[in-house]
Each structure stands twice: as C-alpha cells, then as structure tokens.
Image (tube, helix red, strand yellow):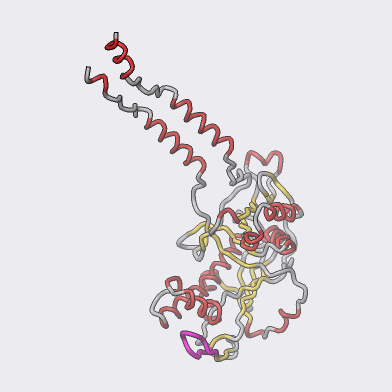
Amino acid sequence: MAGSKKTPGINAASMADISFILLIFFLMVTTMGTDFGLIRQLPPMAEDQKNEDKINERNVFVVNVNQHDNIMAEKSYINISELRGKAKEFFFIGNEGDEFPEKEVKELPLVGSIKVNKTAVVSLQNDRGTSYKAYIQVQNELAGAVHELRNEFCLQHFGKKFDDCSQEEQDTVGKQIYPMAISEAEPKDAGGRRK
Amino acid sequence: MAKFRKDVASETPELATTSLPDIIFMLIFFFMVTTSMRQATVMVDQKLPVATEVKKLENKSLVSYIYLGAPHKSYQAKFGTATRIQLNDKFAGVPDIQDFIASERSTKSENDQKLMTTALKVDEKVKMGMVTDVKQALRRVGALKISYTTAKGEKAF
C-alpha cells in the first residue's frame, strides 16, 4: 500500500490552455507598433506681430509651397531633392557673405569661441491647397538639413554623431550653433480656396 | 477496522482540474470587458506620409490623437468623401477640438498636462487648409506641442 500514500502530481495538462489564453489576452490588449513623427512646437497665439518684422531679410530662408505642391525657395522654383542642400548652405556657419545670415562670435562651453549665425530662420509658407504630403516632405528636408549639419559639426569637434553626444554637447550644438528654427507663417490663401 | 479507516484517510484525492479552463475563461472575459482600449477605431483613410528625420513618440498615455482624412468606404454613404476630423470615436468639426483637448487635459495631473502632445495623424492627400485650421484651434487652446505622425522610411520622396 506504499504507492497510495504518494501525493498525486498536479495535472498540468491544462497549463498549455491557460498560457494560450493569457497569450491571446495580451495580444489583444497590447497596441502594436510605435508611433514615429516629426515633433514640432507651435508658436503661441500671436499677440504682437512686430517680432517677425524685425528680422533682417538675409537671415530668413523663405520656402513657399503652392497649391500645386511646387516649391519655391528664396525666390526660385526648386525640386524637393534640392531643398536639403539649399537649406544646409543657408544654415552652414562657415558660409559668409551678403546672401548668408549675419554671423557673430560666441563664447561657448566645450568648443570655445566660434562664429555662429546670429539669427537664421526658415520661414515656411504654404497654401491652403498644398497637400499634406508635400508639406511633410518639406518639413522633413528642412529637419534633415539641420540634422546633417549637427552631425557634421559633432563629428568634427567631438568625433561622434549628434545622437551619441552627451546632453551638454547636444545642448551646445542643438541650441547655440544649429537650432531648429522653422517658423510657420500665418496661413495664407494665395491660391484660392479649392474643395 | 482501524486499518480500513487509515487507508481511506491517507489517500489525497486528485485535484479536479476540469473546471480550470472555465475559471480562466471567466477571468479573461472579465478583463476583456473591463480593459478599455485607448486606441479609437479609425474611421478615416490613413495613408501617412513618409519621413526620415523622425523621432519616436514617447509616453503614449500623454498623447491625444486627432485623425484627419477622407472617411472610410463604409462611412462614405453617410459622411461623404470630403476630409473629416475624427476625435475619439466620432467625426467632429474644428470647434470641437477645444472641448476635446479640455477633456483630455482634465484626465491628467497638472504636471503631466505640460508634457501632453497632440499627434496629428493626417492622410497624405489632405489639403493643408484643413491641417492649418486644426493647428490654429490647437494654438487657441494652448496645446502647442504637436507631432506630425508619419511612417518611418528610408527615403521621403
């Protein structure tokens, strides 16, 4: 009668079912896929428009997108593929001359005294009829230009890419040398309203 | 007599597991009913534009979504094919955004309110006029942090 005294093992046959149920549950509840996006800060509702006017024309890189999704940068029609290069040329701190933004010498931590753009702003104007796709492409190219310049600067000075830099280095480069300055003008209805 | 009794007492009965699946099923139904899935059913076309310079959207619980696009085929009979705004589970107009943001804010703590992001999920065929209207509405209520949700791609054009 020794056998009958053993505690019987717990039946584990249903374990598989239980785990399957749990699995299905989590599959259903978990939202799959992460969202990616271009993160932007909208300007607060304008109270005084005078700030816009003060900026010198050579410090502003004007990009227009019309209702046919044609892109005009600095008064000439360009292709979307040229935009990144143009924007880089405009922002690049080594470019001097009347057509480029005003420069000033700044004393910065980590890099010492360096000549940077006093103010360099991209003014993005679009029409009500511009497609969202074209708008995002332009935003993307402008952001890409700034990212590339930041990376180039960081590689040159710190020997690594912008994303691999320390917070302090990122702050210096991202805020003082190559800030992401994209100003969106108040909406215009130049091309006429089309539904 | 004594031996007979001992025999009966020492034999532990096997655990009845036949009801276990039912119990688990009950649990699962409980969870299914109580879990609120935040993601609303999207009722508009959503072909997001592609961008390369994207950042990951952190802290999903602080993100409110605004969908823009033409209504899906199944809704077109009722709502037409013009671009519509979807807030939560229903179509809305631009003035409704104010209430939407206010109600999203009221569910968050004061500290979190500053970190709230509005994600614009806009179909690539939508005209900017509509997007601008939404952006102006967001500016009016002070929801300034926005994200243009895009697909992540190697090439943008």
Viewer-proximal residue, A24 or A8? A8
The region drawn magenta spans A106-115
Using the image, determine if residue A156 lies above or below residue B33.
below
Would residue B3 be found to the left or right of residue A82 on screen? Answer: left
Residue at image location 51% in from the left, 63% down from the top: B54
Residue at image location 73% in from the left, 58% down from the top: A194
Viewer-proximal residue, B65 or B16? B16
Viewer-proximal residue, A30 or A59? A30
Percent position of residue B131, x then y: 67, 59
Would residue A40 be found to the left or right of residue A112 on screen? Answer: right
Percent position of residue A98, x then y: 60, 90
Q: Is residue A83 magenta?
A: no
Residue at image location 48% in from the left, 28% down from the top: B23
**Quadrant of the image occupied by residue A47:** bottom right
Which residue in the rendered view is the most extreme toward the left? A2
Residue at image location 63% in from the left, 81% down from the top: A60
Overall secondary structure of the magenta stretch? strand
Would residue A54 be found to the left or right of residue A150 on screen? Answer: right
Q: Please indicate, yes or no, whether residue B123 appears anywhere in the rendered image.
A: yes
Would residue A64 be found to the left or right of residue A173 on screen? Answer: right
